[in-house]
């Protein structure tokens, strides 16, 4: 793959563990996890504060939370990234 996806998973908790257990193919594209309350590595990948990331070009944020997905999305909507919401619409 010439330009592989650059994936940032927003949410470093149980939801992400389950998600990656179900879809392990995602591992190859994960650059880092995003979380406002965690700063240590998560599942062997860096964990960064969402406001402190320079996403560069062609980055995708996958929102890994049912409860906070829309709040996370609203925080990231102007960051110039592609968005993947797992759950449809407002919760």
Image (cartoon, helix red, strand yellow):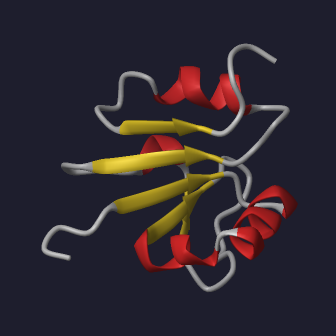
Give 47 or 68, whichever is nearer the viewer: 68
Residue 13 horizontal side relative to residue 45, left or right: right
Classify residue 55 as left or right of residue 8.
left
Who is closer to the viewer here, 59 or 75? Answer: 59
For the point 69% across and 48% down, which residue is it? 64
Left or right position of 57 against 27: left
Residue sitting farthest toward the top? 90
Picture coordinates of residue 63, whole percent (x, y):
62, 43
Residue at the spot 55% in from the left edge and 51% down from the top edge: 49
Quarter of the picture holding the C terminus: top right
Residue 25 visible to the viewer: yes
Q: x%, y% of residue 61?
A: 47, 46
Q: Give the vertical position of 27 relative to 61 (above or below).
A: below
Locate residue 82: give its quadrant.
top left
Between residues 74 and 37, which one lies in front from this camera angle?
74
What is the x, y in percent for residue 77? 44, 23
Furthest residue to the left?
Answer: 2
Give the vertical position of 73 relative to 25 (above or below).
Answer: above
The N terminus sits in image quarter? bottom left
């Amino acid at each position: 793959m010439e330009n592989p996806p650059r994936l940032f998973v927003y949410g470093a908790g149980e939801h992400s563990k389950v998600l990656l257990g179900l879809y392990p193919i995602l591992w190859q594209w994960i650059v880092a996890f995003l979380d406002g309350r965690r700063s240590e590595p998560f599942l062997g990948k860096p964990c960064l504060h969402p406001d402190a990331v320079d996403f560069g070009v062609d980055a995708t944020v996958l929102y890994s939370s049912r409860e906070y997905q829309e709040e996370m999305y609203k925080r990231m909507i102007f960051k110039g990234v592609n968005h993947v919401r797992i759950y449809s619409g407002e919760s």
